[in-house]
Amino acid sequence: MIRTGIVGLGFMGKMHFRCYQALEGVQVAAICDIDETKFENTSGTAGNIAGAEAPLDFTGIGLYTDFDKMLAEANLDAISITLPTYLHKDHTVKALGAGLNVLCEKPMALTVEDGRAMQAAAEKSGRLLQIGHCIRFWPEYAKTKELIDSGQYGKIRAAMFQRLSLTPGWAWDGWLMDPARSGSAAVDLHIHDSDYVQYVFGMPKAVFSRTARGPSNDADHIVTQYVYEEDCVVTAEGGWAMSPTFGFEMSFNIVLEKATIVYDCTRSPAFKVCPVEGDAFTPEVASGDGYSNEIAHFVKAVRGESVPQIITPGQSVDSVRLVLAEKHSARSGEKVSL
């Protein structure tokens, strides 16, 4: 039995709880949050994707408001760190030092230096550190990488990604609207697509970005061109400056020599391959969603099972480095080399 804990009982903490509870051989043994009222009022947590709204049953689970006490008493094998980004580094390093395997939510950290400190702590402890870049595990995105890597539709000509959201005013203490704690939409939201670009195409040679200020008075809407040596165009757009009635959308269009691959969470079907020859079709994809699949992957790795290498701490550091280069490009008005 894998005994796991969760620190931070907001939208993502509840999502992790749901995913752990669905797995056999896993026990959520402890939960920590500085606001103990969250242990009583467990429903209604907002987020831009459904899945964390239902009330939760904490029967038999140790409930803590002190992180150090939980580490000392709960006898955990692993922990999910689902705290605001500015708290990731200190809690991750402490948990690794206590001998726990750690699944820390994305983005890894607000600075490359903090990300590297987390990576070094994992290497020193010999424990697993996985960063929650769930898009790498999202069924349609995972299938798309598989199709691209197969080469069956030829080389990439263009790829366009979008991730747009209403303003996330639901965050605890308004932390998402504080760039010093969240890094703005560029770092918190857009990094999903920056990371996926890195995953599929590798790190670009350079980035060229433009941003618009929004509710946080920082980079709350960003458009980036990722520069590669190959003759292809890769862009991503993301932001949370949309009006309240807009909701949330994530999508991509990937143009290959012999097909266009399309995903749009608002369409039906949301996912399809449009070959140059033949009819469009929707490929079979894995069950679940990115959250459940990344947590299942993490649990298997904690158990010592053989799993494919989908995300590493080094790649997670690079995703922070990449999105910070995008913000730098927008500030300078110039292309930034990586």
Image (cartoon, rainbow, N blue to C red):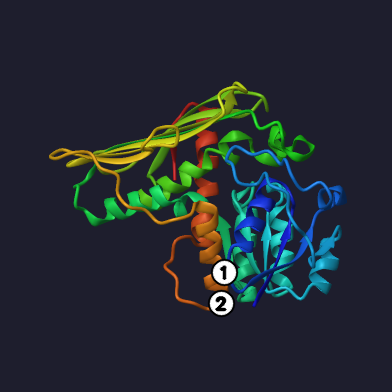
Q: Horizontal and vertical percent for residue 298? A: 55, 66
Q: Horizontal and vertical percent for residue 83? A: 71, 51
Task: Name the mark on residue 11.
Answer: none
Q: Nearer the viewer, residue 274 or 302?
A: 274
* Whether residue 119 is situated above or below residue 269 in the rendered picture: below
* Whether residue 186 is situated above or below residue 111 in the rendered picture: above
Left or right relative to 252: residue 291: right
Q: Residue at x 44, y 61 (%)?
A: 310
Q: Quote the CA–CA distance across marks 2 and 1.
A: 6 Å
Quick one: label 1, few (<14), some, or many (20+) residues within 10 Å?
many
Element under label 2?
helix
Q: Kindly check if marks 2 and 1 are in contact, taking CB atoms under 8 A apart as contact.
A: yes
* Whether residue 256 is situated above or below residue 203 in the rendered picture: above
> Which amino acid does the dot numbered 1 rest on?
Val
Q: Nearer the viewer, residue 192 or 329?
A: 192
Q: Nearer the viewer, residue 265 or 78?
A: 265
Q: Horizontal and vertical percent for residue 239? A: 55, 30
Task: Name the mark on residue 299.
Answer: 1
Element under label 1?
helix
> Which amino acid does the dot numbered 2 rest on?
Arg
Residue situated furthest left in the rendering: 277
Task: Give the quarter of the figure containing the C terminus.
Answer: top left
Q: Quadrant of residue 158?
A: top left
Q: Which residue is mark 2?
A: 303
Task: Give the quarter of the figure containing the N terminus.
Answer: bottom right
Q: Is residue 317 visible?
A: no
Q: Horizontal and vertical percent for residue 214? A: 62, 23
Q: Residue at x 74, y 51 (%)?
A: 9
